[in-house]
Image (cartoon, rainbow, N blue to C red):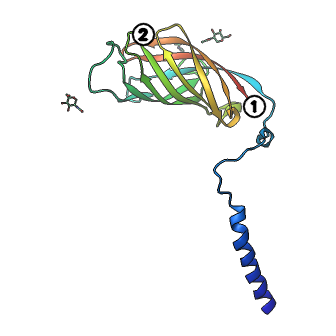
């Protein structure tokens, strides 16, 4: 009985001196790249269509803010207009094509001149197949009236952890009022 309580006291004492040693108070430390257990780097190609729909009773893009003054060139998306999106990604350009994911985020009308540019802050998430649950992050300007655009893939989640790459984009369909669009995406991603 006595021995047991001595052991408990000893254990508590040991804990009280080991806790400060175990807790690492530094906010940074160096790690070996091998500790990430990365597989061989590979290149994945993705092809899909993004449906950006502003009309109807369930739009996938909605305006969430705008400046309280008229600035910049008069266009369907004047400078400073901010949109939130939850756009569907489909295998083909038809509305009945299989949905493979969604693009969630923001885009802002970013140009004061007449060239109609937006800047996109968008996470492209996949809900079907090999990349279900993974996503790629796109952060880029997008001069929407140019026939061929390129965007930067700046990162990713899941199977696309540490991704980088680029998107080649073309407008497949565009209706300026109320600016519904179907866009073709070819994505080239380097990941592990
Ligand atoms: C917009 O600007 C006008 C003129 O400066 C001002 O009277 C009005 O209150 C502003 N509206 C909002 C919603 O801030
Ligand atoms: C989409 O597919 C449906 C059914 O296959 C077809 O009737 C329709 O014409 C297609 N639409 C377009 C724009 O290709
Ligand atoms: C995507 O790649 C396919 C096949 O190479 C090509 O036919 C298509 O024009 C490309 N689209 C874009 C937007 O780059």
Within 10 Å of the Cα at label 1, are there few (<14), some (14-19), or many (20+) other Cα atoms?
some
Relative to 176, 91 lies left or right: right
Query: Is residue 59 among what the camera can see?
Result: no
| Residue that label 2 marks | 115
Which sits in the foreground, 129 or 145?
A: 145
Q: Secondary structure at mark 1?
A: loop
Which sits in the foreground, 59 or 25?
A: 25
At 39% from the left and 27% from the top, the residue drawn is 82
Q: Secondary structure at mark 2?
A: loop
- Residue 124: give x, y in percent of width and height: 58, 29
Within 10 Å of the Cα at label 2, are there few (<14), some (14-19), or many (20+) other Cα atoms?
some
Position above or below: 22 against 57: below
> Where, quadrant-wise, is the C terminus in this rendering?
top right
State the separation of the CA atoms marked 2 and 1.
Answer: 37 Å
- Residue 54: give x, y in percent of width and height: 40, 23
- Residue 185: give x, y in percent of width and height: 59, 17
> Where, quadrant-wise, is the N terminus in this rendering?
bottom right
Quarter where residue 37 is shown: top right
Q: Residue reaching furthest bottom?
A: 2
Quarter where residue 32 is shown: top right
At 36% from the left and 19% from the top, the residue drawn is 79
Relative to 52, 126 lies left or right: right
State ligand 3's quadrant.
top right
Mark 2 or mark 1, which has the lower sequence index? Answer: 2
* Numbered tag placed on residue 157 in the rendering: none
Which sits in the foreground, 163 or 83?
A: 163
| Residue that label 1 marks | 192
- Residue 97: give x, y in percent of width and height: 58, 21
Q: Residue reaching furthest top?
A: 147
Query: Is residue 166 among what the camera can see?
Result: yes
At 53% from the left and 16% from the top, the residue drawn is 183
At 35% from the left and 15% from the top, the residue drawn is 76
């Amino acid at each position: 009985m006595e021995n047991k309580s001595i052991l408990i006291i000893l254990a508590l004492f040991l804990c009280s001196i080991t806790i400060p040693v175990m807790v690492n108070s530094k906010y940074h430390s160096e790690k070996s790249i091998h500790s990430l257990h990365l597989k061989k780097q590979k290149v994945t190609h993705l092809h899909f269509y993004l449906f950006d729909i502003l009309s109807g009773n369930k739009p996938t893009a909605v305006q969430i803010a705008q400046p309280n003054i008229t600035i910049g060139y008069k266009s369907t998306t004047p400078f400073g207009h901010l949109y939130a999106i939850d756009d569907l990604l489909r295998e083909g350009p038809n509305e009945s094509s299989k949905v493979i994911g969604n693009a969630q985020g923001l885009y802002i009308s970013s140009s004061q001149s007449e060239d109609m540019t937006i800047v996109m802050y968008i996470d492209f998430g996949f809900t079907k197949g090999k990349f279900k649950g993974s996503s790629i992050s796109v952060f880029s300007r997008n001069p929407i009236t140019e026939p061929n655009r390129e965007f930067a893939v700046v990162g990713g989640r899941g199977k696309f952890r540490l991704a980088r790459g680029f998107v080649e984009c073309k407008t497949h369909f565009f209706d300026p009022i109320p600016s519904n669009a179907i866009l073709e995406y070819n994505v080239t991603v380097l990941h592990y």
